[in-house]
Amino acid sequence: MVTRMSHLFLRTLREDPAGAEVASHKLLIRAGYIRPQAAGIFAWLPLGLRVKAKIERVVREEMAAAGAQEVHFPALMPREAYEATGRWEEYGDLLFRLQDRKGGDYLLAPTHEEAFTLLVKDLYSSYKDLPLTIYQIQDKYRDEARPRAGLLRGREFTMKDAYSFDANDAGLEASYQAQRDAYERIFQRLGLEYVIVQADAGAMGGSRSEEFLHPTPVGEDSFVRSAGGYAANVEAFTTVVPEAGPIDGLPAPVVFDSPDTPTIETLVAHVNANLEGEFTAAHTLKNVVLALTHLDGTRELVVVGLPGDRDVDDKRVEVAFAPAEVEPATAEDFAKNPLLVKGYIGPWSPEGPVLGEESATGIRYVLDPRVVDGTSWITGANIDQKHVHSLVAGRDFTADAFVEVATVREGDPAPDGSGPVSIARGMEIGHVFQLGRKYAEALGLKVLDENGKLVTVTMGSYGIGVTRILAIIAELNNDERGLIWPASVAPFDVHVVATGRDAAAFELAEQLSGELEATGLEVVYDDRPKVSPGVKFGDAELVGVPRILIVGRGAADGQVELWDRRTGERETLAAADAVARLTAR
């Protein structure tokens, strides 16, 4: 049936909603696709559901082509399985937790690895049942601290998550590649530019992890890529470690007065004014004190040493110390640890090592990989108003571990030798993981192999953000007047607009709408009798159906106007030719 604007559940807005910052957030609300219910939570209206269904259809078609079968799980899941895999605690505050009337613990699932694993365990017991790939399109829930940008970062969102089950690693490789290839086809069909980058597996775990990122200035992720083909998000980037240098013959360390130099900038200015040579921040060793809160609630201080021309990257430090929560040390932390002299912290003092030996402070000292043996540094002497120069790594201090937490910079060398990297912003639209046996082992998913021996199943996990993709398509396809949907996902194929007061225009518009619908096109017909042409045209531009058929003053003479929403071109043609023109492929 033709959808009539007079009956469509739709109210458009002329002004941007308060608090909306990005184009997709503004326009999807203004054009009547979604309505906010709370921060990061939206109701879906008829227009929004139509576009969402078009995207899901593409996903389903490509999942079927890759051999995957669809299932569906509840969003409300019991605690026990997530506790068995450790994710009840690992997800921390991101997890929505609740209890039923009997005191049983439940959660609103952020992902469903546990549920899929237990389902297969319940039904399959032999290698002959494998390989298997099953998927669902389901709403997910994460209690984001700062939901933003509408559908781009919400607390409720729709995701397609698929899971592969194989009896061996070779099978996992094949299943992983099939899903990876399907993702490329999906994004190509949806007209989305993407970059496949190495990624950190995070709480998902596994041996291999790749993200599909859509490059966009409003993206929440930073990624690096080289001209030689390397690509990774910043969390997964690994530093090219310089070769260690000789230590014999290097000058002994010297402590010197450095009043009022608690920052790298003031320290560099001081040493250039008082020491021989020219120094930059790269010659200094910055020591940053972090506080880790572990899953059991214990709090631990860690000191990170890194070159003074680098800062600690929030996302990289989060990954390096996961699943602990990380924050800068507080004044109370320093008060409890007087050996940490704020502004003058270093790995060495005249009395001997202070950091790097838990017997001295109980504090772990970790280093950036660039601080290799034989490198000489200017750093804090752990004495107020004093620093030390000629402090040599491997001779005067060591580390408990090396960590990748420093910022990545434009021009840093790619770890695969493919040249310097550039940095860009992107939005995650898909993520594929080789989970391996983490979940199968935790939940006891085993099958009998060809020799009758029980073996643990190996798994892959593959996610696509359906509602995020919808928002990104809206972000890419709009102008100052409204949305302009690609034909593949537009809520309708044709928007018929009847204008004026002449009954002939409405009669012809009614006829053409029926004829277009009969050809298989999806039609929305603006049949509102007492709405001005200006309002109708404004709504048509805002809603964003790519082809608009205007039936107005020329109707009595059998003339209509075809309006291309994307190019803005309008063409007058005979009404008798309109259907053929709009159905031509």
Image: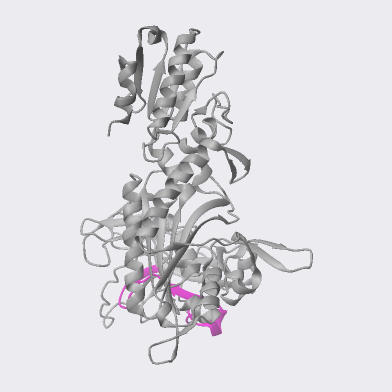
The image quarter containing residue 166 is bottom left
Question: Range of the magenta residues?
Answer: 351-378
Task: Name the residue located 46 percent from the left edge and 50 percent from the top edge.
Answer: 466
Q: Is residue 19 left or right of residue 369?
A: right
Residue 582, percent from left and from top: 33, 27
| Residue 216 covered by magenta stretch | no
Tell me where residue 94 appears, x and y as whole percent: 59, 60
Above or below for 194 versus 509: below
Identify the residue at the far right of this view.
Answer: 101
Drawn side of residue 530 relative to residue 460, left or right: right
Residue 152 x, y percent position in the rendering: 49, 46
Q: Is residue 261 visible?
A: no
| Protein image colouring | one colour
Q: Residue at x 29, y 25 (%)?
A: 581
From where the camera sits, is residue 140 visible? yes
Image quadrant assignment for residue 172: bottom left
State the residue in front, 401 or 552.
Answer: 552
The number of numbered discs placed on residues in the rendered structure image is 0
Does the segment drawn in magenta span residue 353?
yes
The secondary structure that dominates the magenta segment is loop
Screen quadrant of the C terminus: top left
Residue 473, percent across and down? 40, 41
Of 420 and 329, which appears nearest the observer?
420
Q: Tell me if residue 179 comes above or below residue 559 in the rendering.
A: below
